[in-house]
Image (cartoon, rainbow, N blue to C red):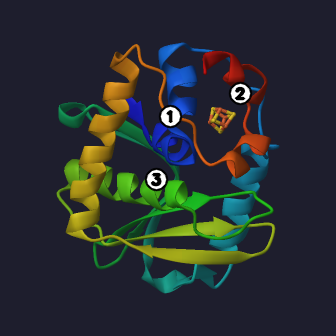
């Protein structure tokens, strides 16, 4: 099954997906990940404020952490850091990113679109936005999601599946990404 994390990796470098999902090679982590405990503390702090990720607390009906959703018919799954349900029924996925680079990147946007797709399919919604929150900078981005974005995501999922099924090593990405990649040491031997 393709995961939302695979989407992130695919838009970082398709070759990473091949190493990770096809060859199942361990990656040397390219960045330090904050622990789950810290993330849970962050969600607690946010949910105790007057606004929850920029939304008035009074408008929020439910806050769910580490929400796993899947859609078997498209072979896709994901765990969103937070799933907000508002009083008017809107559901909003929230991704929490501990990063020194708090800006929108294609992979981060695709993850939000993927969560929106999963919410639609599990709850019969038409999810049109998601939030990426950067705790280190106390900053957030709102990602608007259109029906066209979701259609394109279905094609992305198919492309990732083809990489996993294929024996062909995918093309390399832009070299600026390689310095942060956990497969840098072994990648050259696959050229
Ligand atoms: S080293 Fe560069 S080309 Fe190789 S998998 Fe990593 S990002 Fe892709």
Q: Distance from label 2 to label 3 (Cα)?
A: 22 Å
* Marker disc for residue 171: 1
Going 50% across and 21% down the picture, which residue do you hit?
21
The residue that disc 2 covers is 183
* Marker disc for residue 111: 3
The quarter in which the C terminus is drawn is: top right
Residue 79 % position (x, y): 48, 43
The answer to which of 96 and 179 lies nearer the viewer is 179
Task: From the viewer's perspective, tell me whether residue 188 is left or right of residue 95.
Answer: right
Q: Quadrant of residue 31?
A: top right
Secondary structure at badge 3 equals helix
Going 46% across and 44% down the picture, which residue do you hit?
7
Residue 9 % position (x, y): 55, 41
- Measured along the vertical axis of the image, is residue 142 above or below residue 81? below
Residue 160 % position (x, y): 37, 34
Going 21% across and 63% down the picture, which residue do you hit?
125
The answer to which of 94 and 22 lies nearer the viewer is 22
Mark 2 or mark 3: name the one nearer the start of the chain.
3
- Measured along the vertical axis of the image, is residue 188 above or below residue 127? above
**Mark 2 beta carbon near ligand 1 (under 8 Å):** yes
Residue 35 appears in the picture as rendered? no
């Amino acid at each position: 099954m393709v995961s939302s994390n695979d989407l992130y990796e695919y838009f970082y470098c398709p070759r990473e997906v091949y190493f990770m999902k096809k060859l199942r090679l361990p990656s040397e982590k390219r960045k330090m990940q904050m622990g789950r405990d810290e993330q849970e503390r962050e969600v607690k702090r946010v949910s105790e404020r007057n606004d929850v990720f920029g939304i008035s607390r009074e408008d929020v009906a439910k806050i769910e952490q580490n929400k796993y959703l899947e859609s078997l018919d498209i072979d896709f799954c994901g765990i969103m850091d937070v799933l907000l349900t508002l009083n008017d029924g809107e559901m909003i996925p929230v991704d929490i990113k501990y990063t020194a680079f708090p800006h929108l990147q294609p992979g981060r946007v695709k993850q939000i679109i993927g969560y929106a797709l999963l919410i639609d399919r599990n709850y019969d919604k038409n999810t049109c936005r998601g939030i990426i929150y950067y705790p280190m900078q106390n900053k957030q981005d709102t990602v608007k999601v259109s029906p066209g974005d979701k259609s394109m995501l279905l094609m992305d999922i198919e492309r990732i599946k083809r990489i996993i099924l294929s024996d062909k090593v995918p093309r390399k990405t832009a070299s600026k990404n390689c310095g942060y990649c956990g497969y840098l040491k072994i990648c050259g031997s696959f050229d």
